[in-house]
Amino acid sequence: MAESSKDFSIVGKKTPRIDAYERVTGQAQYTGDLQLPGMLYARVLRSSVPHAKILSIDTSKAEKLPGIKAIIHHGNAQVPWSSGGLTHRRYIFNNPVRYVGDPVAAVAATDRHIAEDALKLIEVKYEKIPHVLDASEALKPDAPKITPNGNLSVGKGPFSAPIEESWGDVEQGFKEADNIFEDTYITKHVNNAQIERRVSIARWDAGKLTVYASTQGVSNARTDIAKDFGLPLSKVRVVCKYMGGGFGNKNQAQDYDYMAAMLAKVAGQAVKLEFTREDDFIGMHGRWSSEQHYKAGVKNDGTITAVTLDAVTNMGAYRKQSGNLSGTDFYNIPNFKKVIKPVHTNTVVAANYRAPAYPQSVFGFASFLDQIAFELGVNPLDMFLRNRAQKSKGKLAYTSNELEQCIIQGANRIGWREKWHKPGETAGPKKHGIGMALGGYPFRPGLGAATIRINPDGTAHVLVGVTDIGTGAKSTMAIIASEALGIPLNQIQLTNGDTDVTPYSVGESGSRTTAFTGPAVVAAADDVRKQIFNLAAEQLKVNAEDLDLQKGEVFVKNHPAQKRALSQVVERAGELIGRATTNPNFPKEMDGKCFSAHFAEVEVDTWTGHVRITRYVAAHDSGTILNRLTAESQIKGGVVQGIGMAFSEELIIDKVTAIPINPNYRDAKVPTHLEAPEIEVIFVENYDPYGVYGGKVVGEPPITAAVATIANAIFNATGKRLKELPMTPDKIVRAVQV
Amino acid sequence: MGEKSQDAKFSRRAFLKGVGGGAIGTAVVSTGLINADVAKAYVSESAGGARDKSAVALKVNGKTYRVEVEHRQTLAEVLRDELGLTGTKIGCDRGECGACTVIIEGRNMYSCSQLAVWMQGKEILTVEGLAKGDKLDPLQEAFIEHDGPQCGFCTSGQIMSGKALLLKNPKPTEAQVRRGLSGNLCRCGNYNREVAAVLAAASKTS
C-alpha cells in the first residue's frame, strides 16, 4: 500500500461524487420517490397526552371512510421493537403511552389525504397517569415511574446505568492541584431534522417481506426486522439506494418500517408510510439534553491534574442509545472520574445525532476550560495546547495524533496571537471576540464485506452494502476500489444498499463505513487482481507475481512496455469475481481517534444579542483524506449544524401540557444560507497505520467542537460566560446587561 | 426569505384545508398570483369540497399535461405522484424548507404551497426540465463540480432557486446568492458549496 499521497492515483484528489449527475438532475430515486403497483399510503396517529393508559381505541368511524384499507394499534398489532427500547420492552404501539407523540395507531388508505382524514376519526380514551418532564425531577423518589424499574435508565451490558468511567486517583489529583474549579453547563434536546422525512415502503410476496427503507444501514435494518417479526434473514430484504440525510436517527429499522410492514400484511397490498414533518420532529429522536457538573484540579500554569464529571442526560420515554458524554476525550487528564445518569422522562426520545456524545459535552468541558484559563490569566490557546490529548484514558497511545498541529495551524490561520484580547475589552456596542475548542471522534476498523466483479470488457462492478446518507460513501468506496484495482474510476460501476444483492455493511453511522467496509473493498480487489494476473501470466508467458495492473492495463513490473489491456486479458473469462470479508486487527494497547481544533471570530451586538460569525477555521486530523472534495463538504456541514445548536435550536416542551410546541423548521430555527459563514478547512494529513490508505474518520467530528468554539468566542467578546444552550439573543442581552 | 416566505405563510396547505373557501380567496389575492383562468378553477373548490376534482392543463417543462386533480392536491404532489417528476422533493409540506421549489412563471416558489388547480395555464419549470437533452444546465454542472449535493434531498430546490435568481440577475453578488437561496434549507449544512456553485455558474454564462 502506498504510504504517502504522492503514490496514490486517485485517493486524496478532489473527486466529484459518482452519483452527482443523478442528484442534480432529479433522477436519484429516494425511498419516497418509489411507487409500487397498488400501493397504499399510511399515516400515524400519536398520543396527545404525556403519560396515560389507553382504555379504548374506537376505529369504527374511521373504518367507514371510503378508501381505508387497514388500521393497526396496540390491540391488534403487538410487534416488539427491540432496538427502540433497551431498558424496557417497547412495542410499535405502547400501552401505556409515555410521551406526547408516542404512536397510538397507523392507517393505510388509497391516498394520503384519506389516511389523514381517518386519523381524526379514531377515538382514543386515555386514563391519565402523572408525568415528569425534567430529568433531575425524574430521579427524585416520588417522581412518576416511567418504567417498572424507575427512571434511571438501566439497560443491559453497555446500556447499564449509571455510565461510569475512571482512571488514576482523582482525590490525589485534586491534592496536587493549586486550584479547584467547579461549574455546571446545560444543553437542550436538538432534532436531527434531516430534510428527507421518514418514509418506508413495505410489501409481502409469498411470505417474503421487502422493505424499501430510508435507513442508514440496510444490513442492521434487516437483522432488526427479522428478529422482531420472527422471520429468517432469507425472508427479509431491505433496500436503500439514496438517502436524504439522517445524522444518526435513521440507523437500523425503526417503528415506521414495522408499521408499514404490518399494514401491508393486513391490507394485502404494498404500503408507503410517510411521516409528516411534525412526526419527524417528535416521532423519532433528537440529541439528548444534559446537565453537566464539572470539578477540575488545575495547577497555576493551567495543567489539569484531575477532573470529575457528574451528569444527567434526558433520554425521553425510551432508551435507544447510550446517553454518554465524552467531551473530555480530547484532553490529557491524568486522574478522571465520570458518573452519568441517563434518565427517562415523559418527553420525546433522545438518541443518536451526529457524534452523539460529543458536541453537548464539548460545549460544557471546553467552556469550563476556557473559563479556568481566564481565571488563571492563561491564554486559552496555551491552555488547550498544554492539556491536549497525548494519551488515551491516561495511558494508551494513539495510532496517530496530529492534534498539536491542528491547534498550531488553525491558530496561525486565524491569527490567534494578533487577534486575541482580554475578554470583553472591545469598546462600543458591537464587540469582537475570538474563541477555540478541541474536538474529534473515535476511530476503529471493524467488520466489512465486499464483492467485485470484473466484466469481460475490463470494467468493474463493485457491490457493497453501504448506504450513502450524504457523506459520499458510495464515491469513497468506488475511489478505494479504483485505487486498489488499478482501474479508472469512470470504468467502475457501484451497486449499494440492497440486502438481496450486496454484501454485509455495518451501516453508515459512527463514521464507520470507510474504516469497516473500505478494507474489504481493498481485499476483494486484491483477490480479483490475483485472478487477473493468473490469466495474464499465461497470455504474456511470465510469472503472475511479476505483474501489475494500473490504468486498466496489465504490465510486467520490470518491463512496463510488455503489457496487455485488461479487456483483452479477461475477454474470454466470462466474469471474474473477487470477494472478501474483513475484520482488521486493532491492538488492545492502543486507541484510535481523529482530532480537530476549531477557531471562530464573532461580532456580538450587545444591544440586540445577535452574533455574527465573521471567520471560522476548522483544522482536522482525519489521517489521509480519501476524497478532498466530499471531506471538505463534511467539515463545512458539520460546523453549520453546530451553529444551529449553538444559537437557536431547541425542542421546546410546554411545561403544562407536555406538548412539543415547535416541531417544525420555522420554529426549531435550523440555520439557513444567511447564518452560514464561509468555513475554512485545514486537513493535517498523516497516514494512520490502521486506516484504509491511512484514512481515519471524517463525518462525525466536525460538529463536535463547533458549539464550544462559538461559545468561547462570545465569552472573549463580552466577558460573560453563557452556560446554557442555545445561546439565543435574549440570553446574550441578559448576560451582557448584568 | 422575503417574498417567498410571505407566499408560504399565506398558502400553506394545512392552512387551506382548515378554512373555508372565502378565506382561500383572500389568501390567493394577497399573493398576487392569480389570473382569471385560475380563479375559474378555484370557484369549483369554493362550491364543492376539498375532495372534488377538476381537470387542469399543467404546462411543465414545455409539455402540457391534462390531469384531473383533487382540489386539495398540491402542485408538489401532482408533479410527483401523477406526472412521475420526483426530482421535486417534499421535505416539510408546509412551506418552510424549500425542497419542493420549482419555477412558476419565472419565480421560484414552494410547490407544496401551491394547489395544483391554481396552475392552469402557468409555465412550470422543474429540475427535470433544466438539461437540454444530454447537455446539463451550467448550474447543474457547477453543482457537480462544487459538490453541491451532500444527501441531495434539498438539491433540486437549491438549483431551482439558483436558476430563478440567475434568470433575473445573471451576475449576482455572493450576498445576493445567499439571499436568493435563503428559502432553501440544507440540513447537511452545505451552504458554502451551494453558493459557490451558483456563483460559478453565473461566471460561466455570459
Image: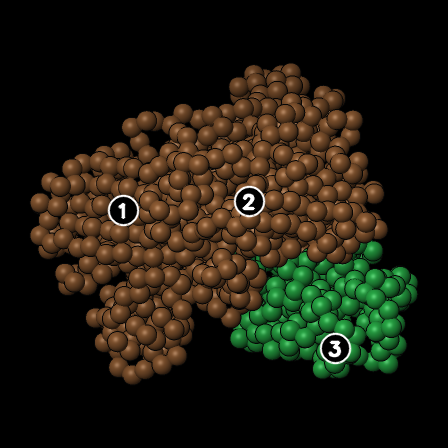
Quadrant in which residue B187 is drawn = bottom right
Residue B60 placement, left or right of A516: right
The image position of residue A193, as x and y in percent, is: 54, 55
Quadrant in which residue B20 is drawn = bottom right
> What residue would you read off at disc 2?
A53
Q: How many labels were placed on the picture?
A: 3
Image position of A628 with respect to B121: above or below: above
Image position of B103 with respect to A29: above or below: below
Chain for mark 1?
A
Q: Quadrant of the N terminus of chain A?
A: top left
The one nearer the camera, A153 or A211, is: A153
Label located before the other in sequence (1 or 2)? 2
The one nearer the camera, A161 or B5, is: A161
The image position of residue A475, as x and y in percent, is: 58, 43
Q: Residue at x 63, y 71 (%)?
A: B202
The one nearer the camera, A260 or B206, is: A260
SS category of the residue bearing label 1: strand
Q: Circle 1: is it few (<14), some (14-19), or many (20+) Cα within 10 Å?
A: some
Q: Circle 3: is it few (<14), some (14-19), or many (20+) Cα within 10 Å?
A: few
Q: Colour of chain A?
A: brown
- Tell us which disc is closer to us: 1 or 2: 2
Chain assigned green: B
SS category of the residue bearing label 2: strand
Amino acid beneath label 3 = Ala
> What residue would you read off at disc 3?
B23
Q: Are marks 1 and 3 on the same chain?
A: no
